[in-house]
Amino acid sequence: REAGLPPGPPTVPVLGNVHIFPTEFAYFKFTEWARKYGGIFSLKVGPSTVVVLTDVAAVKELLDKRSATTGDRPPIHLADCMTGGLQMALARSTPTYKILRKTSGAILTAQATAQHLPIQQAEATQLLYDILRTPQSFYTDISRYSFSVIRSVLYGKRAPRYDTPEISGFFNVLHEFNAILSPGAAPPVDAIPILKFVPERWAKWKRECKRIRNLQRTLYFGMMEETRDRMRRGEGNGCYMEEVVGRAKELGMDDEMASYFGSALQETGSETTSSYLQSLILALVAYPEAQKKAHEEIDRVVGEDRLPTLDDLGHMPYIRAMISETHRFRPVAPLGVPHSTLASEEYQGYLIPKGATIFVNVWGIFHDPALFDDPENFVPERYMLTENGTKPGIDGSDLKATFPFGFGRRICPGMHLAFNSININAMNLLWAFDFKPDIDADGKPITVDTAAYVKGITTAPLPFKCRITPRSTAKAKIIEREFLDAADTFAKFEIGLNEGDKEYAAKSRAYAG
Ligand code: HEM
């Protein structure tokens, strides 16, 4: 480890810390190291430096205030081979990235997001209806919901069932992309750049990247073309990609950029939102007392006769606290998405060299006993005691609601869409259902495992079982009625559905009627 770098675990020659670098659930190890080496520690991965921040003040200073130099992403050569550098969340800080980012800023504003509320609400109503009908498949019903919302607001076309080829087709391509990027799946071309020059006939990874690139382009261009066709036929429905097409010149977007832009938002927006909602349900099952308090509050504010609306949230401090606590308890991106530095920075006497990778240990911060009382438990009350849930007397002002959504110039551009989805669904689910542990053959409750999570940059609870029942017959009736009423909103987003999807949508309406 070079002089001036933040401290960290002892290194060995050449490898540095490669031999001890965690390849999965790295946030646990990083948290352990942070307690030992401090809120700013470093690791050596061969010649490169990784800096891990588990110190809120350092995050604020380095990633927010000095974002001009810390807003790059580490190089991922394979990703660039497949996407041409156009996957916005992974893209380096290039002029092309800046256009993509500007476009997201121009179209995903809080104001614009409000215009997409009707379809978000209609999809949330279908989520209630799906869970009412088939409570055992709540986990995939949530995945359908989040995919369909993003697909509708972006491309103007929904996915009425989870088993549609529209969803499996999209995720198959995404999973192939992620699989080849996972540690060990391909030679370490970023660490050993000379490997990039191995001829294709000896480099299977190059052939694989080409194959996946072709799959991506066929799918993403197809999604774009469908939207464009609908516009040509005068059947536009105001979705975001129509705006991108309409303003392409002004935004500096060509076809290729627009196609990757839309698909990147679809990728980043789907599994993040579903992960959050799945974690919320897991917490409700594991913490019945918290669920009871939320039920009491929503019954008092909303009552039996109608679904909650976004305006109700202002009158529900406990549910607002519960929403924040879910982010803290099980953050969707426990290490954020890694940033990288475009120039050297100095902070509190430490050198953060140019090209260093920076991880924010969101997990370690949210589970720091110095900041939060009883951090391992789901305790919404903490967000009623202090604004950001921290212990009384601790300044938690930098841990604001956007903290789980990242930092500086890279902050999540889909945040406003995500806030609406989370708020609407958290209220709806609590209003509608009781969530209880599943029972075994002897009728005994089976404890859910709140630590069983998917590995990856973003995470989600592993599929789990629970018993979900409507809280009253009157509420079940309202859900059916609202689902039928949503048909008008859905209609604009059901143009061009495949036969299977059309049939499914028609059948579920007939069933509700
Ligand atoms: C619960 C929901 C969500 C969470 C917790 C979340 C969280 C995050 C985080 C932590 C980052 C990395 C920020 C950084 O590098 O500092 C990010 C980036 C991103 N998110 Fe989200 N996100 C969510 C939903 C969405 C949605 C709904 C969309 C799109 C509609 C979206 C689109 C993106 C994109 C495109 C980026 C990359 C930004 C860039 O690199 O410039 N996200 N998100």
Image (tube, grey):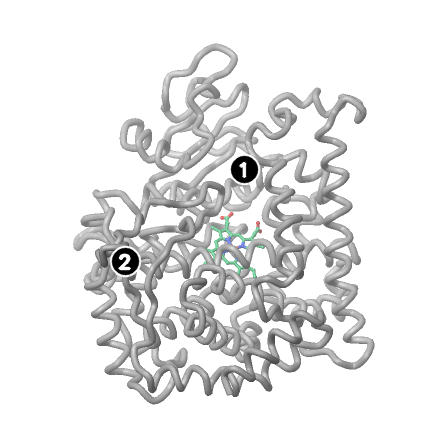
Location of residue 346 by image quarter: top left
Q: Residue at x 64, y 43 (%)?
A: 176
Q: Residue at x 30, y 86 (%)?
A: 304
Q: In this figure, which residue is indicated by the disc labeled 1?
A: 340
Q: How far is the residue under mark 1 from the one under mark 2?
A: 48 Å
Location of residue 20 by image quarter: top left
Residue 333 to residue 472: above or below:
above
Q: Amino acid at mark 1?
A: Ser
Q: In this figure, which residue is indicated by the disc labeled 2?
A: 439
Residue ranking furthest to the top: 13
In the image, residue 297 lies at what x, y percent? 24, 76
Q: Amino acid at mark 2?
A: Ile
Q: Earlier in the sequence, mark 1 or mark 2?
A: 1
Q: Is label 1 or label 2 in front?
A: 2
In the image, residue 167 lies at what x, y percent? 62, 59
Q: Residue at x 50, y 15 (%)?
A: 15
